[in-house]
Amino acid sequence: MKPRITIGALAITIAALLAVACDNTASSGEKTISSTKTADLTITLASATGQLKSGDNELMLSFADSSGALVDVGAASLKFHMPPMASMAEMNSSAALTTTDTPGKYRARVKIDMGGSWEARISYEGPHGTGQATMSVIAK
């Protein structure tokens, strides 16, 4: 009887691990970096650590309606801008966005050149209309 219980427990454990590993839409582990509201959307930028860092970043960008439900906004873009300071020229970094299995949620990859205050500029155009938003973020 004991081998059956062990095999059953092992099978359940493997099935659970596979389900988690194959779920690209799992939001567990995402922590909000910043969020902003437009007229009818809440736009959230998140990462595994809840921080933007100098160097390579993997982020999630999501769009939700007033009830908190994710909504498909169609084509979206995310750019980071740092204005010029003293003898330093302005800096710009564009994120490469890809869709996920969840409409309204985008995976973003971007390289931030240095720590400091950045402005995240978000644009979208599609089934939910056309819009733009900005949010201030700090890269560590």
Image (cartoon, rainbow, N blue to C red):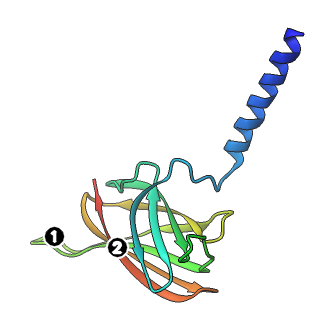
Indicate the secondary structure of the residue bearing disc 2: strand
**Residue 93 location in percent, x, y?**
37, 69
Q: Horizontal placement of 27 versus 139: left or right?
A: right
Which residue is painted at 84% across and 19% down in the image? 7
Q: Horizontal placement of 106 versus 39: left or right?
A: right
Q: Nearer the viewer, residue 92 or 6?
A: 6
Indicate the secondary structure of the residue bearing disc 1: loop
Is the residue under label 2 in contact with that under label 1 (CB below 8 Å)? Answer: no
Looking at the rendered structure, the kind of residue marked 2 is Met
**Residue 78 location in percent, x, y?**
45, 73
> Badge 1, how many Cα within 10 Å: few under 14, some, many 20+?
few
- The answer to which image quadrant residue 17 occupies is top right
**Residue position for label 2:** 135
Q: In the picture, which quadrant includes the N terminus?
A: top right
When the figure is inspected, residue 26 is found, relative to residue 106, above or below; the finding is: above
Looking at the rendered structure, the kind of residue marked 1 is Met
Which residue is painted at 40% across and 74% down in the image? 36
Mark drawn on residue 88: 1
